[in-house]
Image (spheres, helix red, strand yellow):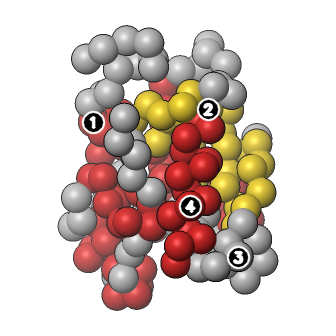
Amino acid sequence: MYFVSGIDYKRTEEEKRDPFLSWKRTDISFFASGACHILAYLFIELHPKEDYKLIYIKPAEGFSGSHLYVSNGIFAFDFNGWTPEKVLLEETQIAYERIYPGWNFERKIITDSIEDFCQNNFHRLPYQFANLPWERAYNYINRFPSSPFQRN
């Protein structure tokens, strides 16, 4: 299995300031850095009867590297598709520590609306993107099996 950390797709300062430039990135770059919350919230909406939770990797004070993904406690879904959650957390820790010694995080279950999550965690609201991101997220989610036990 191949896992890529979001830090591998970190936005430039110019991409952070310019939503049109940010929008032009590849889908994997877009959902790995800057729009992971859009992907996670839509995934939850598409799977309302399944026991998935929104999980937030909240970096320790003074560090960047937040990430929102979906998990059932065993498997996680994010820009990588399906990954065992343990692997996602371990590989994320390794990747960020390599660049930011001492990097650490808190794993938080999020129950907030997307509006509250964005406001409380400094993420763009859907209307703050260059284009509404829902269709892009929907198409990206549909590239992957709907559960970790299926194959496309």
Q: Which residue is mark 1?
A: 139
- The alpha-carbon separation of the residues under discs 3 and 1 comes to 37 Å
Pick whichever, 44 or 64, lies toward us. 64
Badge number at residue 94: 4
Comes first in the chain, label 2 or label 1: 2
Image depth: mark 3 or mark 1 in front: 3
Q: Nearer the viewer, mark 4 or mark 2?
A: 4
Cα distance in 3D space between marks 3 and 4:
10 Å
Residue 69 drawn above or below residue 59: above
Res. 91 visible in picture: yes
Q: Amino acid at mark 3?
A: Gly
Q: Residue at x 35, y 20 (%)?
A: 145
First-in-chain label (3 vs 4):
4
Q: Quadrant of residue 103?
A: bottom right
Q: Secondary structure at mark 3?
A: loop
As shown in the figure, which amino acid type bears the numbered disc 4?
Ile
Q: Amino acid at mark 1?
A: Asn
Q: Name the mark on residue 60.
A: none
Residue 71 is tagged as 2
Which residue type does callout 2 highlight?
Answer: Ser
Task: Assess whether mark 1 and mark 2 are in contact (beta carbons under 8 angstroms).
Answer: no
Q: Earlier in the sequence, mark 4 or mark 2?
A: 2
Identity of the residue drawn at 34% across and 59% down: 30
- Horizontally, residue 94 falls left or right of residue 80, namely right
Percent position (x, y) of residue 130? 32, 67
Q: Residues within 10 Å of mark 2 (few under 14, many from 20)?
A: many
* Mark earlier in primary sequence (4, 1): 4
Q: Which residue is mark 3?
A: 102
